[in-house]
Image (cartoon, rainbow, N blue to C red):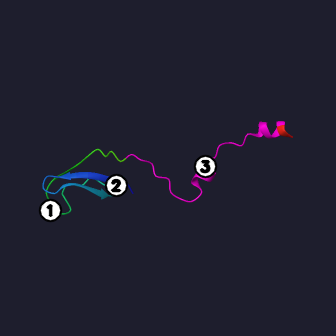
């Protein structure tokens, strides 16, 4: 689930994890005052799992060089 950044008039900035289909928050979960959703700068892509770089980003094997060597 994505993390959204909000700004509360009393508490300041905070992050909140919610579904993409969920409505934005109207009130602060801490103090109950009005909040506004900010445009997040957190646009990094995070690849997790063993073997990602070994299987998905491997450069193709140079077959032409092998054929010439034989």
Mark closest to the chain's N terminus, 1 or 3: 1
Q: Is residue 64 above or below residue 17?
A: above
Few, some or many residues within 10 Å of mark 3 (<14, 14–19, 20+)? few
Q: Is residue 44 above or below residue 28?
A: above
3 part of magenta stretch:
no
Q: Which residue range is magenta in the image?
A: 43-68
Cα distance, mark 2 to mark 1? 20 Å
- Secondary structure, mark 1, is loop
Cα distance, mark 1 to mark 3? 46 Å
Task: Kindly identify which residue carries mark 3.
Answer: 56
**In the shown orientation, is residue 51 left or right of residue 8?**
right
At 28% from the left edge and 56% from the top edge, which residue is drawn? 15
Residue 32 position in % (x across, y down): 15, 61
**In the shown orientation, is residue 28 left or right of residue 22?**
left
Residue 66 position in % (x across, y down): 80, 40
At 31% from the left edge and 46% from the top edge, which residue is drawn? 40
Asked whether disc 2 touches disc 1, contact meaning CB atoms under 8 Å apart, the reply is: no
Task: Kindly identify which residue carries mark 1.
Answer: 31
């Amino acid at each position: 689930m994505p993390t959204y950044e909000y700004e509360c008039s009393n508490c300041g900035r905070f992050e909140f994890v919610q579904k993409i289909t969920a409505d934005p928050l109207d009130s602060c979960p801490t103090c109950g005052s009005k909040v506004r959703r900010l445009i997040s700068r957190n646009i990094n892509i995070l690849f997790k799992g063993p073997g990602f770089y070994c299987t998905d980003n491997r450069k193709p094997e140079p077959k032409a060089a092998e054929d010439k060597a034989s």
